[in-house]
Amino acid sequence: MLEKFVRYCARPPLAKDRLHELPDGRIALQLKSPWFDGTTHVVYEPLDFIAKLAALVPRPHKNLVVYHGVISPHARWRKRVVAYAREPQAAEPVAATATDSTVPPHKRRQWAELMRRAFGYDLLNCGKCGGKMALLACIMQRAVISKILNHLGLPSESPRPAKARASPQAELDHVA
């Protein structure tokens, strides 16, 4: 069983007997079945062929299996179907699950952690001592935000957008 699995994982992306090197150095790939116009082979330059093969390699950390239905990542009933070797939970009524007000775990990540993961910036790292800063509060009231920014000597109003400039075509029309 293990040998079959290893052979499956180690198999090449294309069958070796379908590839042929032409006398001029180009690569001919025989198609599994002829196209509607009768084409049976596709001919590539060597670099183009390598580019086509490289496009078949998935990006790092990309899921190669995508699930649908109740086992999809955001399915409402996923917790009931996928147990992950945890203790079985008591089944919740469907109505309670649909109106559940809890925030999903992926939405609870702090913005600083998301910035670190996405852009590589550790925003909670102190610039002076190098220690870890903590988020104390999230202020949402506009008046309080303005008062704090004014105290720090920072602008409290958002910048006004600049007026749109005229089309470059209009300038060209005046010159002609």
Image (cartoon, grey):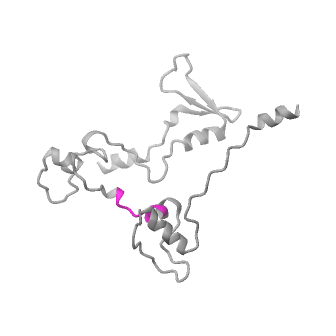
Q: Position of residue 175 (x, y in %)?
A: 88, 34
Q: Say which quadrant the C terminus sits in.
A: top right
Magenta segment boundaries in residue numbering: 107-115
Which of these two is toward me, 14 or 89? 89
| Residue 118 covered by magenta stretch | no
Q: Quadrant of residue 30?
A: top right
Prevalent SS, magenta region: helix
Which of these two is toward me, 67 or 163? 163
Which of these two is toward me, 86 or 116? 116
Taking the image as shown, residue 95 lies to the left or right of residue 121, namely left
Q: Would you place residue 124 above or below residue 103 in this image?
A: below
Q: Would you place residue 136 above or below residue 33 in this image?
A: below
Q: Position of residue 108 (x, y in %)?
A: 34, 60
Taking the image as shown, residue 8 lies to the left or right of residue 47, namely left
Taking the image as shown, residue 106 lies to the left or right of residue 116, namely left
Q: Position of residue 98 (x, y in %)?
A: 21, 45
Residue visible at 12% across and 50% down in the picture: 91
Q: Residue at the right extreme?
A: 176
Residue visible at 40% across and 64% down in the picture: 110
Q: Position of residue 75 (x, y in %)?
A: 27, 44
Residue visible at 43% across and 47% down in the picture: 10
